[in-house]
Amino acid sequence: MYKVECHCKSVKLQVNLPNILDNLVKCNCSICQKRGAIMAIANKDDVNVIEGIDKLSLYQFHTKIAKHYFCSICGIYTHHQMRSNINKFGINTSCISGINLDDIKNVRLSDGINHPLDKK
Ligand SMILES: [Zn+2]
């Protein structure tokens, strides 16, 4: 179990992330490119907001399938429900307590700019 916190600590999540270091992703879609976060991928049922659910803001765009959450006070992206699989969440690794940035080595690139759901 990992604890996930925004900067001002208003929003707290508890996330079960087995094999976290093998499930790290960067993405080149329009929002990820600007956000710049390395994400850990979690199953929906393993993600629990334990504090500050009323402080979370939701941002949606384009097909409005993905749900991008960020703290309405400090503005930090904490997690999002993925468009490619709504049963998965991306978790901002920079918000996870107990993960050392030096341990982050294998990061997969997701080609979100060529999202399969955008192919005609
Ligand atoms: Zn915050």
Image: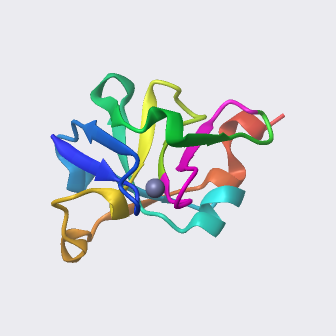
Q: In the image shown, does 72 or 24 lie closer to the viewer?
A: 72
Q: How is the image coloured?
A: rainbow
Query: What residue is at 43 percent from the left and 32 percent from the top?
Result: 88
Residue 6, picture quadrant? bottom left
Residue furthest bottom in the image: 102
The tally of labels here is 0
Query: What residue is at 52 percent from the left and 41 percent from the top?
Result: 55
| Residue 120 visible, this angle | yes
Where does residue 63 sit, x and y in percent of width and height? 78, 34
Where does residue 99 sit, x and y in percent of width and height? 19, 62
Query: What residue is at 42 percent from the left and 56 percent from the top?
Result: 25
Q: In the image shown, does 98 or 11 lie closer to the viewer?
A: 11
Where does residue 45 sit, x and y in percent of width and height? 33, 22
Q: Is residue 82 magenta?
A: no
Residue 23, placed above or below residue 74: above
In this rendering, position of residue 38 left or right of residue 27: left
Q: Does the magenta stretch include residue 68?
A: yes
Q: In the image shown, does 116 or 79 lie closer to the viewer?
A: 79
In this rendering, position of residue 67 left or right of residue 63: left
| Residue 81 visible, this angle | no
Residue 60, picture quadrant? top right
Residue 83, placed above or below residue 37: above
Where does residue 117 sit, x and y in percent of width and height? 71, 34
Query: What residue is at 60 percent from the left and 34 percent from the top?
Result: 83
Range of magenta residues: 64-77
Residue furthest right in the image: 120
In this rendering, position of residue 19 left or right of residue 95: left
Q: In the image shown, does 116 or 57 lie closer to the viewer?
A: 57
Q: Quadrant of the C terminus?
A: top right
